[in-house]
Image: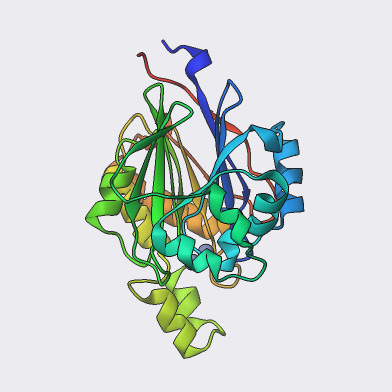
Amino acid sequence: MSNSENNLWISTIASGSSGNSSIIGDLSGNNILIDCGISCKRIVEGLNELSVGVEDIKGIFITHEHTDHINGLMMLMKKYKIPVFASLGTLLAITKCRGFDNSYKKIMHKIYANCAFDLNGFEVNCFNIPHDAAEPLGFSFIKNGTKVSVCTDFGMVTDEIEEGLRGSNAMVVEANHDERMLEAGRYPFQLKRRILGDKGHISNENSGKLITKIWNENMQHIFLGHLSEDNNMPELALETVRCELFMKHKNYEEYTKISVANRNNISEKVVIKSPII
Ligand SMILES: [Zn+2]
Ligand SMILES: [Zn+2]
């Protein structure tokens, strides 16, 4: 039995190297944006499609300063003055980006890995992730006993990532590339090396291994995110992760749905059933 008023929901507005933005909300109009790597206009359009007003975004959490995660940030800060939360390293990097204005500093808030805090009833947790950015973070949000997480842009799986994601009822997790497609593909050697490196991006196979390791029967939905356009295909990412999970947890489909986050438009709005609390 669950109390539907306590449900959280999750969706994505864009996902991939051309822009990332995920959204988590409760059913009382408290919503949180994680990254805003597409234009402010497209984010507002995506929010409208999800029936969320931009004034109902209580905070924007930034994983790191790469353009595909902050493209619309300056305009969102300028027009809507939504509070922004990120690590010190990420905040400092943002201050050096084009379009930054010193007046934005008063809505920017420094947060620390492994130091939980409260935002509108959400317990916010963040954890370090290995990626070639200043001080990148993954996030999880807990409300009414439901945990929802977002973790993309990491080159390898660490204990901290496993701990950060463990117990999630839903999550967006990266499945960036198929290693064989990347190795055989047209990218220059240096770029291939960067992506495959410990601070690059995670392959479908390693994403599947991570999911398999932390999976339990309470995990209701997984969005595979940040797929490479050149070195991956949605069906391949899904199939690889499903195979990994199936090998260890034959009955996972009874409990968990896996889908690929859409690259250029919103994904389905997934309501997560709240456990008894
Ligand atoms: Zn990145
Ligand atoms: Zn990225």
Residue 159 point in image, percent of width and height:
22, 54
Q: Quadrant of residue 15?
A: bottom right
Residue 128 point in image, percent of width and height:
32, 57
Against 235, residue 49 (above or below) is above
Which of the pair 129/228 is nearer the observer? 129
Against 216, residue 101 (above or below) is below
Residue at 68% across / 34% down in the picture?
A: 55
In the picture as drawn, the residue positioned furthest to the left comes out as 159
Count of numbered circles on the image: 0
Which of the pair 37/116 is nearer the observer? 116
Residue 16 point in image, percent of width and height:
58, 61
Give the quarter of the figure containing the C terminus. Answer: top left
Which of the pair 138/165 is nearer the observer? 138
Residue 50 point in image, percent of width and height:
69, 35
Residue at 70% across / 48% down in the picture?
A: 43
Q: Quadrant of residue 72?
A: bottom right
Against 80, residue 209 (above or below) is below
Position of residue 41 in the picture relative to residue 190 (left or right): right
